[in-house]
């Protein structure tokens, strides 16, 4: 049995990971530690909550005393750190919590991992640490780190600490850097679920700037299969980029969503641009493809339809979200843009 501390497992990618992995493996014992911020939702984990090889702890990765207690109590030998503040716009409104969770929190986990001699520490990172591309080129693992937003700067810092623990103390770390994810259970502050929900409700779709910023989209299950592979077989001390070579300008995504929902493009509203908006992200994933034999299995055309259908079928899930704190976030974020 592998005793694995998964942090941030009640969020979008972490909960998809736990649901996926516990469905196929009974040799993993997963301790899911999550602070349950606005983005964490235990409803995402209904399928697994009664499994014997799963347990949940509500807690903050910044709390060193709690983290040490958890390592000791559950004899943690592996860590997968998904926990983070993850939204660029929120980091622009206030950077402090990003520094606290993403930098200090990761450091607390690294210290505990060192103290308890873990066998592997997987840091879940993002392609945003590389900064922005012009109209050509791809991010490789050798691209210099050059983050632009408070979010990406905090993720870059946690990557650097992870690498320093490997270099200095020999902590067995690996890092994955993935591009933009989409799929079921994504909190509707991010582009795709926000646009799907607004379109369903016949609300305006707020496109930043001219809509020509480009992201490289990957279905969340493809990401999590890559995470599983790197966790099992990734070379210690290495970084692996993950991406599905699916670059699209934001406006194209918005149009695909409207078309699938049979809604008019008149719902599109161009709004004030995001400050410091990164122009383009695009991933070279040849390293993980060649070394670990990973490749993406989902194509955008059908996976976006599955995603839209998931939101149509799970109205209760998102109605509860948009009736809470989300409404004040949305008003604050978009009222002075429009
Ligand atoms: P999310 O915001 O949906 O979920 C984050 C989870 O972390 C939530 O459950 C939240 O409650 C928890 N959390 C936040 N602060 C915490 C703390 N101090 N202690 C414990 N738990 C805490 O994020 P996501 O989209 O699922 O992203 C997961 C990870 O993947 C993040 O590290 C993010 O940087 C990275 N990533 C995300 C994307 C993407 O497209 N969403 C792409 C590449 C990498
Ligand atoms: P987002 O989902 O926030 O991911 P990230 O900024 O981490 O890449 O945004 C994806 C793209 O969509 C980004 O270029 C900003 C743009 N965007 C909008 O145009 N309107 C919106 O309401 C949001 C949330 C994002």
Image (tube, rainbow, N blue to C red):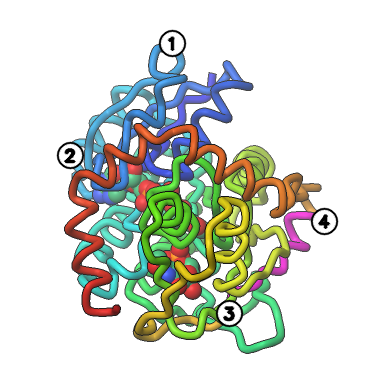
Q: Is mark 2 within 8 Å of ligand 1?
A: no
Task: State if disc 3 and disc 4 touch (CB < 8 Å).
Answer: no
Q: Where is residue 200 in the image (x, y as percent from the top left)?
A: 44, 50
Q: Is mark 4 on a helix, strand or loop?
A: helix
* Residue under the point 73% across and 55% down: 288
Q: As drawn, which residue projects farthest toward the bottom?
A: 134
Looking at the image, can residue 165 be seen?
A: no
**Horizontal arrangement in the rendering, residue 87 relative to residue 118 (left or right):** left
Spatial CA distance of label 2 from label 3 is 41 Å
* Residue under the point 45% across and 59% down: 195
Mark 1 surroundings within 10 Å by alpha-carbon count, few (fewer than 14), some (14 through 19), many (20 or more): few
Q: Nearer the viewer, residue 89 or 330?
A: 330
Q: Does the residue labelled 1 lie within 8 Å of ligand 1?
A: no
Residue numbers of the magenta segment: 281-290
Q: Which badge, 2 or 3, is on the more N-terminal residue?
A: 2
Spatial CA distance of label 2 from label 4 is 41 Å
* Nearer mark to the viewer, of 3 and 1: 3
Q: Where is residue 14 in the image (x, y as percent from the top left)?
A: 45, 40
Mark 3 surroundings within 10 Å by alpha-carbon count, few (fewer than 14), some (14 through 19), many (20 or more): many
The disc placed on residue 290 is 4
* Nearer mark to the viewer, of 2 and 3: 3
Q: Is residue 203 above or below residue 67?
A: below
Task: State if disc 4 and disc 2 touch (CB < 8 Å).
Answer: no
Spatial CA distance of label 4 from label 1 is 36 Å
Spatial CA distance of label 4 from label 3 is 25 Å
Q: Is mark 3 on a helix, strand or loop?
A: loop
Q: Which of 75 and 289 is in front in this view?
A: 289
Q: Which badge, 3 or 1, is on the more N-terminal residue?
A: 1
Residue linked to disc 1 = 52
Q: Which badge, 4 or 1, is on the more N-terminal residue?
A: 1
Task: State if disc 2 and disc 1 touch (CB < 8 Å).
Answer: no
């Amino acid at each position: 049995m592998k005793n694995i501390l998964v942090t941030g497992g009640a969020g979008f990618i972490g909960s998809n990971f736990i649901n996926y992995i516990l469905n196929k493996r009974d040799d993993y014992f997963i301790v899911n530690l999550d602070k349950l911020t606005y983005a964490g939702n235990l409803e995402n984990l209904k399928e697994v909550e009664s499994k014997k090889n799963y347990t949940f702890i509500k807690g903050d990765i910044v709390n060193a005393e709690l983290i040490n207690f958890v390592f000791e109590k559950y004899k943690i030998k592996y860590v997968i750190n998904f926990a983070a503040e993850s939204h660029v716009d929120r980091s622009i409104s206030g950077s402090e919590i990003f520094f606290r969770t993403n930098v200090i929190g990761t450091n607390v986990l690294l210290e505990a991992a060192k103290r308890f001699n873990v066998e592997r520490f997987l840091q879940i990172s993002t392609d945003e640490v590389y900064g922005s591309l012009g109209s050509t080129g791809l991010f490789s693992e050798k691209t210099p780190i050059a983050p632009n937003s408070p979010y990406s700067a905090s993720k870059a810092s946690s990557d650097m600490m992870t690498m320093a623990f490997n270099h200095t103390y020999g902590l067995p770390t690996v890092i994955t850097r993935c591009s933009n994810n989409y799929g079921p259970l994504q909190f509707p502050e991010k582009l795709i679920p926000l646009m799907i929900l607004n379109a369903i409700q016949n609300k305006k779709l707020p496109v930043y700037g001219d809509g020509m910023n480009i992201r490289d989209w990957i279905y969340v299950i493809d990401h999590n299969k890559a995470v599983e592979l790197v966790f099992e077989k990734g070379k210690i001390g290495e970084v692996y980029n993950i991406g599905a070579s699916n670059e699209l300008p934001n406006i194209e995504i918005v149009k695909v969503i409207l078309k699938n929902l049979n809604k008019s493009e008149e719902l599109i509203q161009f709004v004030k641009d995001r400050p410091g908006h990164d122009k383009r992200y695009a991933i070279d994933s040849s390293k993980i493809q060649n070394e670990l034999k990973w490749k993406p299995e989902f194509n955008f055309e059908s996976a976006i339809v599955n995603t839209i259908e998931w939101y149509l079928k799970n109205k209760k899930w998102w109605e509860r979200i948009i009736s809470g704190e989300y409404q004040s976030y949305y008003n604050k974020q978009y009222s002075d843009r429009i």
